[in-house]
Amino acid sequence: MSLRSGNNKKKGQKHQNTFTFKHNKGSLLTRKITSSPLDLLCKRCIEILQWKIDYRKYKPLSTVGRCNLCKEKKIYKAYRTICDECAINHLPKKLCTKCGEEVDEYEKPINSRNNPESGVKKNVPVIEVVKGLKKKYQKTVYRKINKGVKINYDEEKGIIDRETKEVILPLRNIVGKDYEDSEDDNEEEEEKEENYDKINEDENENKNIKLNNNDNNNNIIINNEQQINKINEINSIDIEKK
């Protein structure tokens, strides 16, 4: 039973989200959120997750999730209830990995950076794939190679063990940043260079001001010394006359 008196109409939340969140470009968490995969989803679920990314409400997955169909821990993406294999192989229609509804075709994300297929490397030797990795991922792969593990590159899984087919490095860690990220990096570098130039100019101006002040102080000291010397000479002359 409601305790409200009079009008029982529920009001909206106090702080309405009227504009998108301005992400910090230098944040590692921001890069992780903005590049989160939005694949194998229906149109409605893509809109929901895209809104979460735009308004900084998206929370990346911290632990592996369990699939509601196969009951195995195969979910590596946030807000998913069904693993990719179960969603794709479901008959007669495919399933949305978030809501579980049947779909004819999966909706493509608005941003290419949220589409894992846009950055997947195909028909590339495993050596070149390893060279393009980050240093921490390279160390992981080289550690396995030093132990005698023979590696292979799989376009669907990532870098795997050739014999046991165990995933050494998943595909999500191999897929590189797209052109939008590179543009952001270039903008950041340009801003850093401009700021560096401004700092140098300010430092040079401050040095010039200090030098001018030092010169003026030196001139004042010299003039004062000259006046003192003149006074001393006059005094010595007066004493001699007396």
Image (cartoon, rainbow, N blue to C red):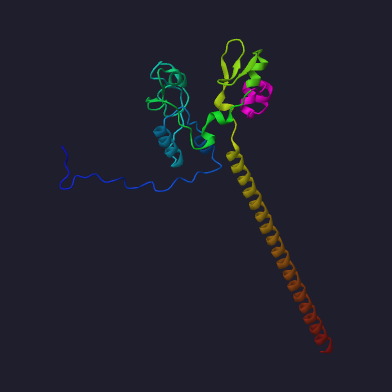
Look at the image and tell me in which quarter the C terminus lies.
bottom right
Q: Quadrant of residue 50?
A: top left
Q: Which residue appears at 43% of the width and 16% of the height?
A: 72
Q: Looking at this rendering, what residue extends furthest in the bottom direction?
A: 242
Q: Quadrant of residue 165?
A: top right
What is the chief secondary structure element of the magenta stretch? helix
Q: For this rendering, which residue is in front, 113 or 31? A: 113
Image coordinates for residue 175, horizontal then vertical, percent: 58, 29
Q: Which residue appears at 42% of the width and 48% of the height?
A: 19
Look at the image and tell me in which quarter the N terminus lies.
top left
Image coordinates for residue 241, horizontal then vertical, percent: 83, 89
Q: Which residues are magenta?
A: 123-140
Q: Which residue appears at 56% of the width and 31% of the height?
A: 118
Q: For this rendering, which residue is in front, 182 or 203? A: 182
Q: For this rendering, which residue is in front, 17 or 238? A: 17
The vertical placement of 167 against 240, above or below, is above
Image coordinates for residue 111, horizontal then vertical, percent: 51, 37
The vertical placement of 182 against 219, above or below, is above
Q: Is residue 126 magenta?
A: yes
Is 124 displayed left or right of 62 in the figure? Answer: right
Is 145 displayed left or right of 218 in the figure? Answer: left
Q: For this rendering, which residue is in front, 10 or 235? A: 10
Q: Quadrant of residue 155?
A: top right
Q: How many marks?
A: 0
Q: Which residue appears at 69% of the width and 55% of the height?
A: 200
The vertical placement of 183 against 45, above or below, is below
Q: Is residue 215 magenta?
A: no
Image coordinates for residue 182, horizontal then vertical, percent: 61, 40
Is 165 displayed left or right of 63 in the figure? Answer: right
